Image: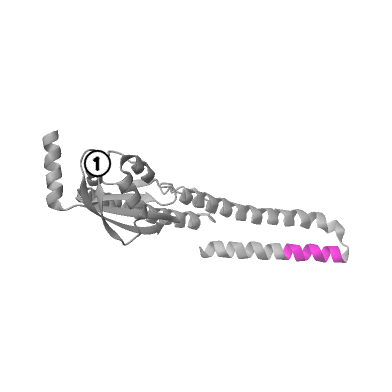
Amino acid sequence: MYRIQWIIIARVLLLFVCTAVTAWLIVKGLYSYLFLMVPVLIYLIYRLCKWQLEVYYEINDFVEAVHYRDFSRNFDIRHAPANLRPLRKGFNCINAILKRISREKETQYQYLQRILEMLETGILSYEEADGDVLWMNESLKKLLRLPYLKGIHSLNHRDKVLYREVLSLTPGENKIVSIHPESASFKVLLSATAFQTEGKNISWWLFRISTRRWMRLRRKRGKSC
C-alpha cells in the first residue's frame, strides 16, 4: 500500500516538474526544446488518467455486483496490476463478509418460516401499497380452506365480511370476527401489526383460534376426508 502511495506521489511530482519546465521553455521562447518535453508531458498525463480509469472501472464493477447481490464474484489478485491488488483484496474481503451475512439471513429466514408453519395461529403478510400477499402459513390456508391467495383484495370474493374486517383493523388492535370458510362458520381473534422495510409498508395479520376449537376443526376435516 505504501509503495503505491509513493508511486502516485512520484508521478504527480514528475508531472509537476515537466509542466513547470514546459512553461519555462515557453516563457523563455525556447520553442525548439518543446518537441522533447511535450511528448513526455502527454505521456505522463495519459498514464495518470489511465490509472484513474482503471480504479474507476474496478469500483464500478464491484458496485454493480453488490447492486445485483452477486457476492460470488472473486477478483483476481495474482494477475492484477500492482495498483489494483489492494483494491481487489479489499473487494474480496467485503464479498466474503456479505456472502456470510446473506447466508446467515437466509438460514434465519428458513428457521423462522419453519417455526411459523408449525404455529396453530394463522398468519398473513401483505404489502399495503398494492395488496400483494407476501406470505401466509399453512395454518391459515387450512383455516380458510384456501390453498393460495395472490392479493388481499382477492379475499373479498371468498369472505366479504372478513375482507372488510381485515382492511378496517388498525395496527395493534384486536377484534373478534366471524369467518365463513365454505359451509363452516366460527369466530377468531384477529389482530394486526405493521412495519416498514426497504421503503415498503408491510402488514401482518394474526388469526387466532382456541386450541380446543382448532382440534375439533381438524377432526371434522379428517372425518370428511
Quarter residue 169 falls in: bottom left
| Horizontal relation, residue 21 to residue 64: left or right | right
Q: How many marks?
A: 1
Coloration of the structure image: one colour
Q: Quadrant of the C terminus?
A: top left
Residue 98, given in percent of the width and then of the height, sits at 39, 54
Residue 7 sits inside the magenta stretch:
no
Q: Camera-side residue: 98 or 155?
A: 155
* Residue at screen point 27% across, 50% down: 123
Quarter residue 153 falls in: top left
| Span of residues in magenta | 17-27
Residue 94, given in percent of the width and then of the height, sits at 42, 56
Q: Camera-side residue: 79 or 86?
A: 86
Residue situated furthest top in the rendering: 225
Residue situated furthest right in the rendering: 29
Residue beneath disc 1: 181
| Horizontal relation, residue 101 to residue 54: left or right | left
| Horizontal relation, residue 188 to residue 164: left or right | left
Question: SS at mark 1?
Answer: loop
In the rendered image, is residue 78 in sight?
A: no
In the rendered image, is residue 33 in sight?
A: yes
* Residue at screen point 49% across, 51% down: 62
* Residue at screen point 34% across, 43% down: 155
Instruction: Indicate the amino acid at tag 1.
Output: Pro
Residue 24 sits inside the magenta stretch:
yes
Residue 75, given in percent of the width and then of the height, sits at 46, 49
